[in-house]
Amino acid sequence: MQVLDGQVTVEMADGRQQVRVSGGGSGSVRDLPDTFRVVSVEHDAGRVVLRADDGREVRVTPGQLATPGIMIPPELHPEHQAHLEGELFGLPTVPAPDADGSELTATLHDARLGAVVFDPVEGVSAYQVPTALGPVQVRFCSAGRERVEALLPITCWMLDYLPQLLAMAVEFLWQWGANGTDTRDDHEQFVDSFGVHRLSVYHCGAFSLELSDDQTVFAESFLDGYWPSIHFLPDGEPVFVTIEC
C-alpha cells in the first residue's frame, strides 16, 4: 500500500490493483490495468504522479483520478484491461475542479449533438440532444476533448438507433428482474413503460442507457428516487444493470 497526503492510496484488493481517492466526506475507487504496476506514488505541483515498474508514468490531479469510469464488471467486458489502460492515460485531459487549463474546458460544437460542455464539476455532457424518443442528455465518462471527438461517430449511431437500443435495454432489465410469476400482460406493460433520460458513453465505446419512467413503473419496481441504468458493450450487447439515484 502507498499513501499520498492521506488522499490518494494505491492498494491491492481481490487480486486487482486499485487507486483510492478520498476527500469531501466520500471517495472513489478506480481499478488500474494489470500492465501498469505502480511502484511509486509522488506529488508534483498539484499532480499525483503514478510510476509503473516499466518506467511509464501518469500525472493527474486527484480530481481527475476520481472521475467516474466504466461500471461494467471485468468478467463481463472482454477488453477490460485495454479499456482500463486507455482510460488511465486519458485522464490528464479530463476536466476536474482541481485541474486548471482552458484547453480542458473549451466547449465542443457538433452538428448532431450541439454544444458539448466540458464542466469541471458536472463532467462532459451535451444537453437536450434531439432523438426519435425526445430530447436526451449525452454524457461522456472519463473522456477529454480528443477522445470525445473520436467517439462522436459511434455516439451518433447510438442516437440514431436509440429506439432499438431502448427495446434491448428494457428486455434485458425485464429478464434481470423476472421472478417467474409474471404474466405476458405484465411483460407487455413493462416493456412499453420506459423512455431514456441519459446516454452515457465510456472511454472505450461501451455505453449505458439511464431509463426514465413514462408509466409509473419505477414506483412499483424501484425505491423512490432510484432508477435503472443498463450497460452495453461497445458491440451493442447489454450485459449489466446498475441502480442509480
Image (cartoon, grey):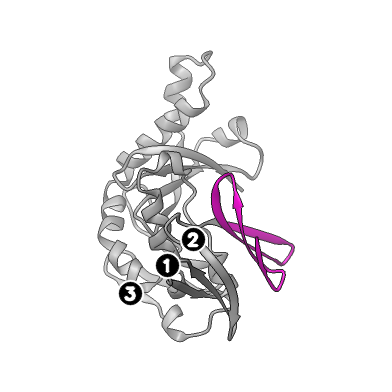
Image x and y of residue 218, in percent: 57, 36
The residue at the point 26 percent across, 69 percent down is 111
Q: The residue tagged with tag 2: helix, strand or loop?
A: loop
Identify the amino acid type marked 3.
His
Q: Is the magenta stretch mostly helix, strand or loop?
A: strand
Identify the amino acid type marked 2.
Arg
Q: Is residue 102 positioned above or below 179 on the image? A: below
Q: The residue tagged with tag 1: helix, strand or loop?
A: loop
Pointer 2 or 3: first along the chain: 2
**Quadrant containing the N terminus in the rendered view:** bottom right
Identify the amino acid type marked 1.
Asp
Q: The residue tagged with tag 3: helix, strand or loop?
A: strand
Label count reads: 3
Q: Which mark is residue 244?
A: none
Looking at the rendered image, the disc whose residue lies closer to the viewer, 2 or 3, is: 2
Return the residue at label 3: 109
Q: Which mark is residue 37?
A: 2
Disc 1 to disc 3, C-alpha distance: 39 Å
**CB of mark 1 within 8 Å of CB of mark 3?**
no
